[in-house]
Amino acid sequence: MKVLIVYDTASPTRNTEKVAQTLGEVLREKGFEVDCKHVNDTDPAIAKDYDSILAGAPTHAFRATRPIMQFLDRLSKNDLSGKLGAAFDTQLQGRLTGNAAKGIEKKLQSLGLRIVAPPLVTYVEGKMEIIHLKDGEMEKIRKYAEDLAKNLQTYGSNPLLPIPVEHLYYGYVTVE
């Protein structure tokens, strides 16, 4: 199965890129063919060549960054309907920080992708020039990717199999 991971990243420490690369690394270990690309280096026309699209961005001003949303806006529903997808983001942890993954997931659904995993929310902390992933987040990303691989295998091999709601919303957002 071919997987495209497309992401935007904004901090000097490139946290969302780290999330994307870790997802790609685990999926490759599980036998998937993965291309992990920054949104600015990705032609939307190539999305049709993949079986699954994972899209992610940092949360800025309560939503996904403009480059990832513009990329998704340029995708064709005709080319993506029935393919598999999932969303991820990085964000500060708090009640008033917003969530990029929700908007990305909605857009993927509107393009006809079948969402096979809950959105991955990865928390960061620190000041802008030294912002970093919170302790334990890398382990959460790896576990998410392992579960995602199982779902991609299950639902990719049987496109008529309905995806149970409990597969979509079960706990990659940790609340303290």
Image (cartoon, rainbow, N blue to C red):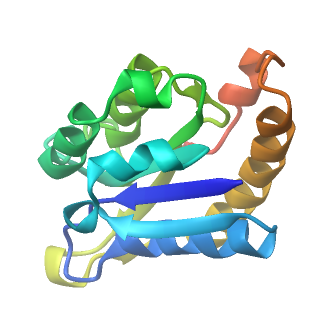
Q: Position of residue 52 (x, y in %)?
A: 58, 45
Q: Residue at x 29, y 48 (%)?
A: 44
Q: From what the image shows, is residue 87 above or below residue 138?
A: above
Left or right: residue 51 compared with residue 93: right
Left or right: residue 90 compared with residue 33: left
Q: Residue at x 81, y 67 (%)?
A: 30
Q: Nearer the viewer, residue 97 or 27?
A: 27
Q: From what the image shows, is residue 163 above or below residue 146?
A: above
Left or right: residue 149 compared with residue 76: right
Q: Residue at x 18, y 48 (%)?
A: 65
**Residue 147 in view here:** yes
**Residue 134 in view here:** no
Total count of labels: 0
Q: From what the image shows, is residue 47 above or below residue 145?
A: above
Q: From what the image shows, is residue 160 above or below residue 70?
A: above
Q: Position of residue 68 (x, y in %)?
A: 24, 48
Q: Position of residue 21 (x, y in %)?
A: 51, 74
Left or right: residue 2 compared with residue 80: right
Q: Residue at x 16, y 41 (%)?
A: 70
Q: Nearer the viewer, residue 143 or 171?
A: 143
Q: Nearer the viewer, residue 141 or 24?
A: 24
Task: Using the rendered view, name the quadrant where residue 167 is placed.
Answer: top right
The quadrant of the rendering that contains the N terminus is: bottom right
Task: Using the rendered view, name the quadrant where residue 69 is placed.
Answer: top left
Q: Nearer the viewer, residue 9 or 45?
A: 45
Task: Using the rendered view, name the quadrant where residue 61 is placed.
Answer: top left
